[in-house]
Amino acid sequence: MSEIRYDVVTGKIAVISTERGKRPHDFKKADVVKSNGPCPFCPGNENMTPPTLVEFCDEKGTWKLRGFNNKFAAFSKDTNSSMVEGDNELHNELHKANDGYGVAEIIVESNHHDKTLGQMEIDEIQNIIKALILRYDEIVKDKNIKYVQMFKNFGANGGASLEHGHWQIMAVTFIPEAVERELQGVEKYKNGKGTCPYCDIVNDELTEKTRVVAENDRFIVICPFASRFAYESWILPKEHKKAFNKIDSDDIKSLSSLLKYIINRYEDLFDYPPYNIVIHTLPHQDERDFHWHIEILPRLTTFAGFELATGAYINPTPPEQAASILRLD
C-alpha cells in the first residue's frame, strides 16, 4: 500500500509508494551531453563573462572561485524602477504585472571544469558558502529586494545549462510562494504548539534515528518524512537560527563537511545524478520567525500529469529506506 504523507509546515502532500521501494540501481542514469565549445566559466575565458563581483584566489593569485552577474539574466536592475513597489501598472486588474526588477548572479565554484561538488575539499566548499554570504549581504542593501534565492543546478535534468559547476543567486522584489508558505506554516505551528516545527523535526529525528543520514555538532542531514523526491535530503541547523547569512565560521565548517558528505554519497550511489540544492532562509527585513535550511532534491524521476495537476508528488522510495542507503553505518 502507498502512504499519503503531509509536510507539517507547508501541508504539501507526498505519496510514498512503499511497494516500489526503488534502490539506486533501479533508476536510469541520466544521459550526459558534453559541449564542444569554449567554456565561459573556465580560466582564460573571463572576457566571455561580465566583470568579477567576488573572487577567492590562491597564493599565486590564480582565482579558485569567481562570481559575476548572469549574462542571460531572468531579472535585472535595468528596468523601470518606479514599477518595483507592487504598483501593477503594466496591465489591468485581470492582468497584473511588474517589470522583472532584481538580481541574477553566478558563482563559479571551481576553476576546474569537471570538478564536482562531491570531489571538492572542505575548504573549497567553505569558499562557496562564504561567497554566497558576501553576495547576499551586498545584494540586500537594495531596499527593493525582498528575497534572495541561492541555489545550485547540476546536470541537464537538474536544469544546468553549462557543465562547469556553479551556483546561482536570484534576488527579487517579492517573497516567493514556497517560502511564504513555510513562513506561515512556522507561524501557525508556533501559535498552536509554542515551538518551532523545524526544531521539533530535528529533535524528533535525532530521537527516532530512522531518517537521519548524518550529523555533526551543529547540523543534521535527514530524509524528510514527507519527501516529494526520491532520496530527497535536508540539512538543518540543530540550533534555532533564522537566517543563512548569519552563520559563523564554525557553522560554515560544519555545514561544508556535511554538504560534501551527502553530495559525495549521491555521486557514488547514483553515478553523478542530476539534482538541485536550494537554500531557504528568512526574507530580508522580515520580522517573522523561521528556521533556515537546505533542501537537496535529486532528479531521479520525471514528474508527469498527476504531479503537475495536483501538486502532490509520488515518491517511489520511502525516506526511511533512502536514509538507510545514504547513511554510512
Image (tube, grey):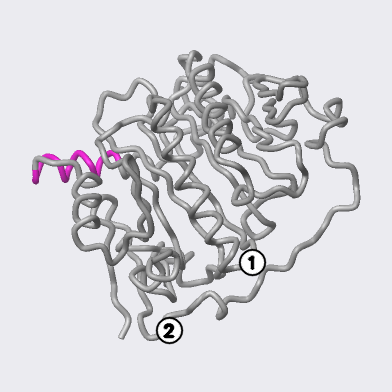
> Which residue is outermost to the right?
37
Residue 81: x and y in percent read 57, 15
Residue 127 drawn in magenta? no
Closer to us: 130 or 318: 130
Circle 1 packing at 10 Å, graded few (<14), some (14-19), many (20+), is some
Is 327 situated left or right of 41 in this image? left
Q: Looking at the rendering, which quadrant does residue 67 occupy?
A: top right
Question: Which quadrant of the figure contains the N terminus?
Answer: bottom left
- On screen, residue 231 above or below 264: below
Residue 291: x and y in percent read 29, 38
Residue drawn at 53 percent across, 33 percent down:
126
Is 242 situated left or right of 141 in this image? left
Residue drawn at 45 percent across, 33 percent down:
252
Residue 191 drawn in magenta? yes
Residue marked by disc 2 = 20
Q: Looking at the rendering, which quadrant does residue 285 occupy?
A: top left
Residue drawn at 54 percent across, 54 percent down:
263
Residue marked by disc 1 = 271
Is 248 situated left or right of 101 in this image? left
Q: Which residues are magenta?
A: 183-193
- In primary-sequence order, the first of circles 2 and 1 is 2
Give the residue type at disc 2.
Arg
Is 136 situated left or right of 166 in this image? left
Residue drawn at 43 percent across, 64 percent down:
328
Q: How many marks?
A: 2
Circle 2 packing at 10 Å, graded few (<14), some (14-19), many (20+), is some
Element type at mark 2:
loop
